[in-house]
Amino acid sequence: MPSVSEIAGVEEAAEVLASAAGRGERVSIGREDGDVVISTAGLDRVLEHEAGDLTAIVEAGVRVRDLNLRLAAHSQMLALDPPGNPTIGACIAANLSGPRRHRYGTPRDLVIGVTVVLADGTIASSGGKVVKNVAGYDLGKLFCGSEGRLGLIARVALRLHPLPEAARTLVVPVESAVDAAGKARAILRAPVAPSAVDLLWPGRLALLFEGGRRGVEEQVGIVRSLVGGTEDDTVWADVEARQSSSRGRVSFDPGALAETLDGLEEAVVRVSAGVAYASNSVEDPRGQAEIALAERVRAQLDPNDVLV
């Protein structure tokens, strides 16, 4: 049975990793794959919140919804909405995102600074706590999608956004792959700025509009005049359930939406991002060159193969 280390600080994490590396033990973060399992549940503090700058520094064990409850008191939010209520560290390590990816991007777009602990116990930081920051190597982007293989994410500086005054959802029926592609194209070319454009395939386009009440109402009207639809905000529960239960992810050229849909039985599709969460298993969406590059980076940061 692996030993579990509940860490409560950066220095403690460094000690655990350095000790394990010295003993030749394998370490996993948040999952029982190593001789030593590190839990970040104790890293659950919001260290700073600069409301005027729309930034916050949090520890990796803070959960997304818990953070947003706190930020809501200041009419602000972290615009990550992955399924469930994962930790900030898990969002970065697994590059998790949700429907709002269309407007706000993925974790790599919202992380402006990070403190990590490498496999040998070295503590490293990059970035800062302002949005326009170019200090040091961008470890934040490097660690997005690293799956715990490059090091432990301990602290994160995040870019925040104002909480919208109003939010409305429009659901548009689609009859075929060609119909879905045509309606999605019309929406994306229209003078509107949706926060989410998700396709629940087969059957429905789900559109989220956020902002001032008047602006949201105008955008809903524009899209209705183009492609029809009815309002139903319960669709996002279905989106979350499908993404959570998906068994594979497909990357595709957004211009080839119709062709991609023809090869999917059921999926949640982030139309503009070119990503589909499929109900069936699929191959790794990364190419061989990308996988090889990731392994070269991992070998540089963890030459003794401590992290698993």
Image (spheres, helix red, strand yellow):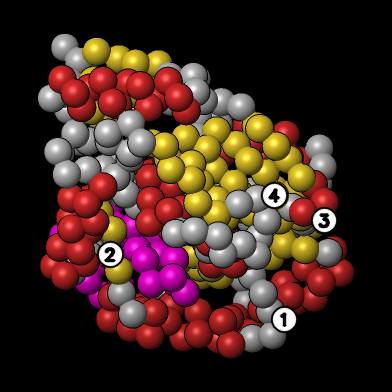
> For the stretch drawn in magenta, what is the main secondary structure?
loop
Q: Residue 62: horizontal and vertical position, in percent?
A: 55, 31
Q: Give the extent of the magenta segment.
A: 261-283
Query: Mark 3 — residue?
Result: 165
Residue nearest the observer in this picture, 252 or 124: 124
Using the rendered view, name the quadrant where residue 132 is placed. bottom right
Q: What is the secondary structure assignment of the residue under circle 2?
A: strand
Q: Earlier in the sequence, mark 2 or mark 4?
A: 4
* Circles 2, 3 touching at the beta carbon (< 8 Å): no
Q: Is residue 124 magenta?
A: no
Query: Mark 2 — residue?
Result: 250
Q: Earlier in the sequence, mark 1 or mark 2?
A: 1
Q: Amino acid at mark 1?
A: Ile
* Circles 4, 1 touching at the beta carbon (< 8 Å): no
Side (left or right) of 228 relative to 269: right
Of badges 4 and 1, the one in the foreground is 4
Q: What is the secondary structure assignment of the residue under circle 4?
A: strand
Other residues around mark 1 within 10 Å, as few (<14) / some (14–19) / many (≥20):
some
Side (left or right) of 19 relative to 230: left
Figure quadrant of the C terminus: top left
Question: Going 18% across and 50% down the picture, which residue do you hit?
Answer: 299
Residue nearest the observer in this picture, 258 or 288: 288
Circle on res. 55:
4
